[in-house]
């Protein structure tokens, strides 16, 4: 059989058919866009500016107190007073136990003590206290007759001593001398100013 040859019109038609088929074929799908990632970041709130340091206010000193009652303070210290010469068997006791002359917080307070079983002219000592702490007796010697003690201020007392003048009996004693006793904070001691009864 003799070979067939395509005519130009057939070739053209085939070309058109190919173009038409190509145009109808689905186009390539577009690439999908990359997903958007949202990042949430928590930013801490700014700290408030530091306020200026407050100026420290000085607190006034509160006097220290021993916490002891008058009876406790006397009982704890009265044994340190030396016995009176010639009357060693007589113990020292509070002369007026009910008198509130002791102050656990005062710069200077006192308690008058005398010998047990004594008389009006029995020797007496004055126990001194600083904020309830026993300091010792006002004088080294004990003097007869109950002294009269007056408070001048928180740190001072005034003592009036009685004694017999020459020729007087004990009941007639008219001699008087005065002395003040003041607590000195600087020296941490008691300063005496005045006189005491004569000893001879």
Image (cartoon, rainbow, N blue to C red):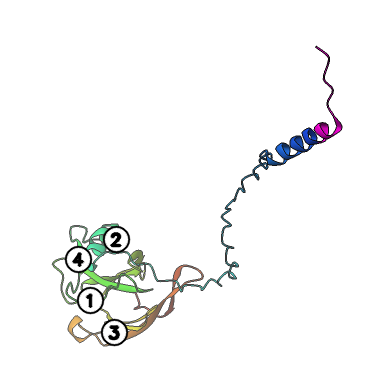
Between 56 and 27, the one lying in front of the other is 27
Asked if residue 84 is positioned above or below residue 180 in the image, the reply reads: above
Dot 4 falls on a residue whose secondary structure is strand
Q: Residue tagged by mark 1?
A: 100
Q: Residue beneath label 2, please?
A: 81
Relative to 91, say whether 100 is above or below: below
Say which quadrant the N terminus sits in. Answer: top right
Mark 3 and mark 4: Cα distance apart in space: 27 Å
Q: Earlier along the polypeptide chain: callout 1 or callout 4? A: 4
Q: Is residue 34 left or right of residue 136?
A: right
Residue 149 included in the magenta stretch of the image: no
Instruction: Give the alpha-carbon distance from disc 2 to disc 1, as whole Å.
Output: 21 Å
Name the secondary structure under disc 3: loop
> Label 3, label 1: how many angstroms apart (C-alpha)?
31 Å
Quadrant of the snapshot with the C terminus: bottom left
Q: Which residue is mark 3?
A: 165
Q: Earlier in the sequence, mark 2 or mark 4?
A: 2
- The circle on residue 93 is 4
| Magenta stretch in the rendered image | 1-12
**x and y percentages locating residue 117 in the rendered image:** 13, 67
Residue at 67% across, 43% down: 30
Q: Earlier in the sequence, mark 3 or mark 1?
A: 1
Q: Which mark is residue 158?
A: none
Point out the residue furthest to the left here.
117
Instruction: Provide the secondary structure element on which disc 1 rests.
Output: loop
């Amino acid at each position: 059989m003799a070979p067939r040859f395509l005519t130009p019109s057939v070739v053209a038609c085939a070309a058109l058919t190919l173009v038409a088929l190509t145009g109808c074929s689905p186009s390539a799908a577009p690439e999908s866009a990359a997903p958007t990632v949202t990042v949430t970041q928590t930013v801490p709130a700014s700290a408030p500016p530091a306020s200026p340091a407050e100026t420290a206010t000085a607190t006034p000193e509160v006097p220290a107190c021993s916490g002891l009652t008058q009876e406790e303070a006397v009982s704890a210290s009265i044994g340190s007073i030396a016995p009176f010469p010639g009357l060693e068997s007589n113990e020292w006791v509070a002369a007026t136990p009910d008198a509130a002359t002791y102050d656990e917080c005062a710069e200077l307070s006192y308690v008058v003590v005398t010998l047990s079983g004594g008389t009006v002219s029995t020797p007496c000592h004055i126990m001194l206290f600083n904020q309830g702490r026993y300091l010792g007796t006002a004088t080294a010697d004990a003097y007869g007759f109950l002294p009269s003690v007056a408070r001048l201020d928180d740190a001072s007392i005034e003592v009036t001593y009685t004694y017999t003048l020459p020729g007087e009996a004990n009941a007639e004693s008219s001699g008087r001398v005065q002395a003040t006793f003041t607590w000195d904070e600087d020296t941490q001691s008691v300063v005496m100013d005045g006189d005491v009864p004569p000893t001879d």
